[in-house]
Image (tube, rainbow, N blue to C red):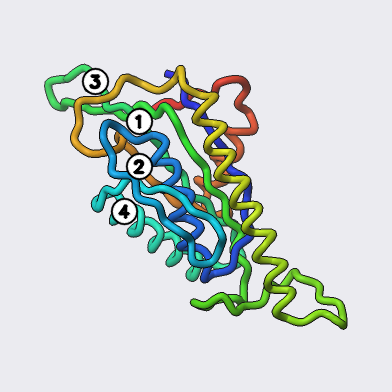
Amino acid sequence: MNCEVCQLKELEVEHFEIREVLRCILHTIFFHRALGLVRPKDIDLELFEITYVQCGDVELERKIDEKIDQFIDKVEKHPNKKNQICLSFYEVKNKQATWFSNKVERLHWEQWYINLNVAQNSKGHSGKSHHPKVEVNPGDTAAEARRARRTALECSLRDVLFQIIRFVNEKRDHVPPIPNLDGVSFPYEITISSSSDSAFGMDMFKRMLQTGHPTMLS
């Protein structure tokens, strides 16, 4: 089975922006890969002039928030690293049973890589923070520098959302038949890694070697 991979544009964010940015991206992907009837819910971001749509499923929202909490915890424990979330959709197949086992395997058919570079020394919970890479001319104010950085990030986040929409519209042949399952989503898993993890390095190496439609063996 072919596994389509979408490597989303890397975003440079500050600590207090992580949660909103990840919610926006993950919920957008899930909405465009939703099954059956959903209850679309428009969400206006507090930090950016962007509106995205959630599926309106409480359980999905809870699981996404749990993973975001884990991501933030990893960022705090391992600063100065590029961090990545991988959202994988898969099919469940029963392998041939043996006398001692009845194995179930996951066949991944789509993977989304969300890449964040979190600025250091900017932990906070309000919109008032400084970006270490912004160069402010003598006549500029700190507020103007923050607005410029925020505007740039907002544009980049919009680019990511459009990237998701283009991928979904262009990549359709690999999507499996709708499974007979409850819930609004195909079976999925969300994994977290950073540039210090061996898994992160191996994933990057594998993607460099892949040509055409990458395949994933479970």
Earlier residue among tags 4 and 2: 4
Q: Secondary structure at mark 2?
A: strand
Mark 2 = which residue? 189
Q: Is residue 4 visible?
A: yes
- Between 19 and 3, the residue placed more toward the observer is 19
Callout 4 touching callout 2 (CB < 8 Å): no
Residue 196 shows in the view: no
Q: Which residue is mark 1?
A: 90
> What residue is rendered at 30% in x and 32% in y?
35
Give the class, few, some or many, for how many residues have Cα within 10 Å of label 1's Cα (few <14, many ≥20): many
Q: Residue at x 77, y 82 (%)?
A: 141
Q: Position of residue 13 (x, y in %)?
A: 60, 63
Label pair 1/2, CB-CB below 8 angstroms? yes
Q: Earlier in the sequence, mark 4 or mark 1?
A: 4
Q: Mark 1 or mark 2, which has the lower sequence index?
A: 1
Secondary structure beneath label 1 = strand
Q: Residues within 10 Å of mark 4 (few under 14, many from 20)?
A: some
